[in-house]
Amino acid sequence: MKKKILIIEDEKILAEMYYDKFLSSGYNVILAQTAEEGIEEARKEKPDLILLDILLPRMNGIDFVEAFKKEKDIINAPIVAFSNYDDPETKKRAAELGVKDYLIKTNYTPEEIVNKVRSYLKD
């Protein structure tokens, strides 16, 4: 069975690029543009992993993780943050909340991000 990835990314071009990349790599992909939409999709779709942008409108990625951890009806999917927001305090907080990795988008090609995600989904 194909693994399901939820991508929470508000930049439409990036979201579509990662959607296509993960789809062509054999994953089922769900997109959300806001943290609030991400929580709804996680409830509904029960993803195997969440790829989360940190800088989102209204509710940021850290707020998402805090809210996600309080949800009783959402499976405990691993979260990988990916952002261009390279802030040590934000990275520290993400780690404290159990985020598996914090990837700086500009440091990785889309293929490298797929490979990183794949490493967290090994059966």
Image: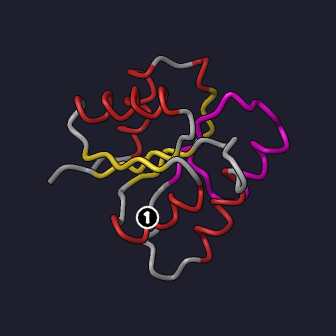
Q: Is residue 17 visible?
A: yes
Q: Position of residue 61 (x, y in %)?
A: 66, 51
- In the rendered image, residue 105, in percent from the top left (x then y), is placed at 59, 25
Q: How many marks?
A: 1
Residue sitting farthest toward the bottom: 72
Q: Is residue 21 above or below residue 99?
A: above
Start-end of magenta stretch: 79-100
**Quadrant of the image containing the N terminus:** bottom left
Q: x and y percent of residue 57 in the render?
A: 69, 48
Give the residue displayed 64% in from the left and 59% down from the top: 64
Task: Give the quadrant of residue 107.
Answer: top right
The type of residue carrying mark 1 is Ala
Q: Residue furthest left?
A: 1
Q: Which residue is mark 1?
A: 42
- Answer with the quarter of the image where residue 111 lies: top left
Is residue 30 a member of the stretch shown in magenta?
A: no
Q: Residue at x 47, y 26 (%)?
A: 13
Q: Give the residue furthest to the right.
A: 89
Decide if residue 28 is on the left or right side of residue 74. left
Residue at point 52%, 65% (across, down): 39
Q: Quadrant of residue 71?
A: bottom right
Is 3 on the left-hand or right-hand side of 42?
A: left
Question: Residue at the spot x=43%, y=64% of the render?
Answer: 42
**In terms of depth relative to the viewer, which is nearer, 30 or 98?**
30
Residue 95 visible at all: no
Left/right placement of residue 48 relative to residue 69 reads: left
Residue 113 sits above or below residue 4 on the image: above
Please provide percent x and percent y for residue 62: 71, 54
